[in-house]
Image: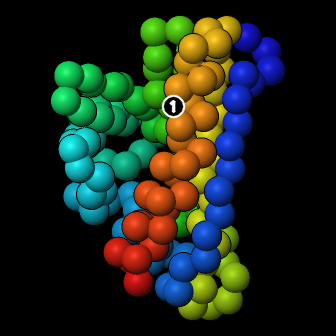
Amino acid sequence: MNAPAWTFEYSIDCNTSRQFAYRYWTDIANWNDPPARFELDGPFEVGSRLTTTLPGQTYHSIICHVDPDRAATIEMQLTEGVLSSRWEFEDRTESRTRITQRLILSTTNASLVAQATLLEQTTPVGMNKLVAAIE
């Protein structure tokens, strides 16, 4: 698996400082996406494991990159690939931040690619919800 099978990126501006937005997002107690539940096995740092539980499904991820107050990458292991989610927090002004989520699916399974394209609709909705909560 050399080149990604699918990628998607979405950005949104938030009326708060980069540090506040990043710290809000990295506190998984703020992750409100029913029916999903989230558990982190330690602090939000490289090597910590994240479990996402949905009705009838459980997904395991690992935090593989952290640039405090600026960016983080979480990789979800799938049975036939990896879904990487890179979050970036950029200063627009002192009190305005651009949040970008970049999703990258590495797989050779075409059905996983078809399922991943659903994230093109749900990711913007989720990020708008996140910004509303932060603000």
Residue 33: percent from the left, percent from the top? 29, 52
For residue 114, above or below residue 121: above
Q: Residue 43, position in %: x, y?
A: 31, 48
Q: Which amino acid does label 1 sit on?
A: Glu
Residue 38: percent from the left, percent from the top?
25, 42
Residue 32: name its quadrant. Answer: bottom left
Q: Is residue 120 rendered to the left or right of residue 19?
A: right
Colour scheme shown? rainbow
Percent x, y of residue 134: 39, 77
Q: Is residue 25 left or right of residue 39?
A: right
What residue sits right under mark 1 in the picture?
75
Which residue is located at x 20 percent, y 22 percent?
56
Please indicate, yes or no, whether residue 80 appears anywhere in the rendered image: yes
Q: Residue at x 62, y 40 (%)?
A: 103
Furthest residue in direction right, as rendered: 3
Relative horizontal placement of residue 98, taking residue 73 as reference (left or right): right
* Residue lying at 42% horizontally and 45% vertically, measured from the top left: 45
* Whether residue 74 is situated above or below residue 108 in the rendered picture: below
In the displayed structure, 70 sits above or below 37; it is below
Quadrant for residue 93, please give it: bottom right
